[in-house]
Amino acid sequence: QVRLVQSGPEVKAPGSSVTVSCKASVGTFVKYGISWVRQPPGQGLEWMGGIVPIIGSPNYAQKIQGRVTITADESTSTSYMELSSLRSDDTAVYYCARVLVSNHHLTVIDYWGQGTLVTVSS
Amino acid sequence: DVVMSQSPDSLAVSLGERATINCKSSQSVLYSSTSKNYLAWYQQKPGQPPKLLISWASTRESGVPDRFSGSGSGTDFTLTISSLQAEDVAVYFCHQYFYSPFTFGQGTNLEIK
């Protein structure tokens, strides 16, 4: 059974940082990658970036590059997404997702975590 | 960035009738070397994460009812629900995973008429 369990909701002040974790089933990182996708309330989906853990180098959306850091700890099957310099428009549900890998490249997302609501408010 | 444009934004269909959702990409997502289209369809119900229905434009995922089908190639794609059931009420998204940054359509809200 595929499991992606994310950390709990966060409330953060503008300008601060947040880290969301995503614990995957053991062995996930051997064959799969991880993407992070966010969804503002009532809106669509935005891909933030992803990582193929066996390769190690993350790939970020240029729009958010410089504020986001995605890592993967193979020893604990956990991925982390850190977002800095938070603004009110960063308020969203943040999802981690398992990604099929082909020739070391991320392809289709096949399973999603339950989501983590991050609220940015003063 | 590759723009994914879905139509319509909202759709109301009677139970048992066909529902058709279109998705157009601003660039072709067909990889000519493999003849694979890097296009997926997801279903999202309120308060839930998206669920993968179709990958590679037309491959139905295991466990997805066969009333769901995907078609198209290059820049134009379609998700068809052949006979709408009550449990199909949801928002549907297309998604291209060929070009980074990967992008999603804006979503189509499917309701019962």
Image: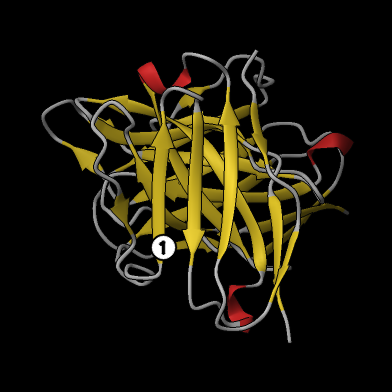
- Quadrant location of the N terminus of chain A in the rendered image: top right
Q: Is residue B24 left or right of residue B13?
A: left
Q: Which residue is located at x 47 percent, y 54 percent?
A: B23
Q: Nearer the viewer, residue A4 or B39?
A: A4
Q: Is residue A52 left or right of residue B110?
A: left
Q: Chain of mark 1?
A: A
- Quadrant location of the C terminus of chain A in the rendered image: bottom right
Quadrant of the rendered image containing residue B17: top right
How many marks are shown on the rendered structure? 1
Dot 1 corresponds to which residue? A68
Q: Which residue is located at x 37 percent, y 65 percent?
A: B3
Percent x, y for residue A117? 72, 59
Percent x, y for residue A11? 74, 69
- For label 1, the SS is strand
Q: Which residue is located at x 75 percent, y 31 percent?
A: B83
Q: Is residue A109 above or below residue B24?
A: above
Q: Looking at the image, can residue A14 be seen?
A: yes
Residue type at mark 1: give it.
Val
Q: Is residue A88 left or right of residue B99?
A: right
Q: Is residue A99 above or below residue B112?
A: above
Q: Mark 1: few, some, or many residues within 10 Å (few <14, many ≥20)?
A: some
Quadrant of the rendered image containing residue B85: top right
